[in-house]
Image (spheres, rainbow, N blue to C red):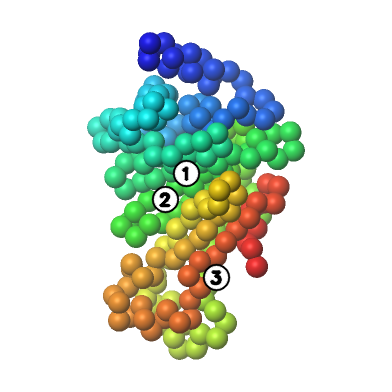
């Protein structure tokens, strides 16, 4: 019975997607492999079957690692694709189409994220004007002394920023820096008073704008 339901769901997922999508699960099943290269459609359908039946079960991905669907509702899901990578997906309607916002986070081991947006046919929006990934400068308050700012820039050669959906409707994105995990405690304490703990973003049509 489970396999029959999976086949039916797969057939629905492969139908052309026009206008407003049904659920985020449709997009999870139909994603062509740019975001989930380790998970076949069958893997994803099995993960949704397990989740919908109340079972937190991992599946073996294409590299023999374990992947698990952690959270899913009609417009949002979170997947642990491997031990070091997590993917969040959220969908919203913009005009006559559905836009899927994807956050991919890799533990390096400090979490580091990237964001992409796609239309209902899994074509990517590539304009840099739609979202500007925050840098470490965005977390620094204006009153940080110049010499301390220079020390921070030397210490943080690779800026690591984590993104995550927030809110009951997943309509806010929170950005946090990884300095506390990256630096030794004594060094971090020098910078902490001059750092914003987080930056929030909100959706404005296709754009994702920083909340002042």
* Mark 1 crowdedness (10 Å alpha carbons): few <14, some 14-19, many ≥20: many
Image quadrant where residue 151 sits: bottom left
**Residue 47 visible from this viewpoint:** no
**Residue 26 visible from this viewpoint:** yes
Q: Which of marks 2 and 3 precedes in the sequence?
A: 2
What residue appears at the point 41 percent right and 11 percent down from the top-left corner?
4
Q: Which residue is mark 3?
A: 138
- Whether residue 178 sits left or right of residue 129 in the image: it is left
Q: Which mark is residue 105?
A: 2
What residue appears at the point 50 percent right and 88 percent down from the top-left corner?
145
Q: Name the spot of residue 20 as percent of width and height, x first.
A: 67, 30
Please, which residue is most extreme toward the left here? 64
The number of numbered badges drawn on the structure is: 3
Front tag of 1 and 2 = 1
Q: Which residue is mark 1?
A: 88
Q: CA distance from mark 3 to mark 2?
A: 19 Å
Q: CA distance from mark 3 to mark 1?
A: 23 Å
């Amino acid at each position: 019975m489970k396999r029959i339901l999976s086949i039916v769901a797969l057939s629905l997922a492969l139908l052309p997607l026009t206008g407003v999508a049904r659920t985020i699960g449709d997009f999870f099943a139909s994603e062509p492999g740019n975001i989930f290269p380790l998970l076949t459609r069958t893997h994803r359908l099995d993960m949704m079957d397990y989740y919908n039946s109340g079972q937190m079960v991992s599946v073996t991905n294409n590299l023999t690692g374990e992947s698990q669907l952690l959270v899913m509702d009609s417009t949002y899901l979170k997947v642990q694709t491997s031990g070091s990578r997590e993917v969040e997906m959220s969908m919203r309607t913009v005009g006559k189409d559905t836009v899927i916002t994807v956050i991919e986070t890799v533990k390096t081991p400090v979490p580091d994220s990237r964001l992409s947006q796609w239309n209902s046919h899994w074509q990517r929006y590539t304009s840099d004007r739609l979202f500007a990934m925050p840098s470490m400068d965005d977390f620094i308050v204006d009153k940080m002394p110049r010499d301390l700012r220079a020390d921070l820039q030397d210490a943080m050669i690779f800026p690591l920023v984590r993104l995550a959906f927030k809110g009951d409707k997943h309509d806010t994105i929170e950005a946090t820096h990884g300095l506390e995990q990256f630096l030794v405690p004594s060094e971090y304490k020098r910078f902490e008073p001059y750092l914003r703990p987080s930056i929030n973003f909100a959706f404005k049509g296709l754009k994702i704008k920083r909340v002042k």
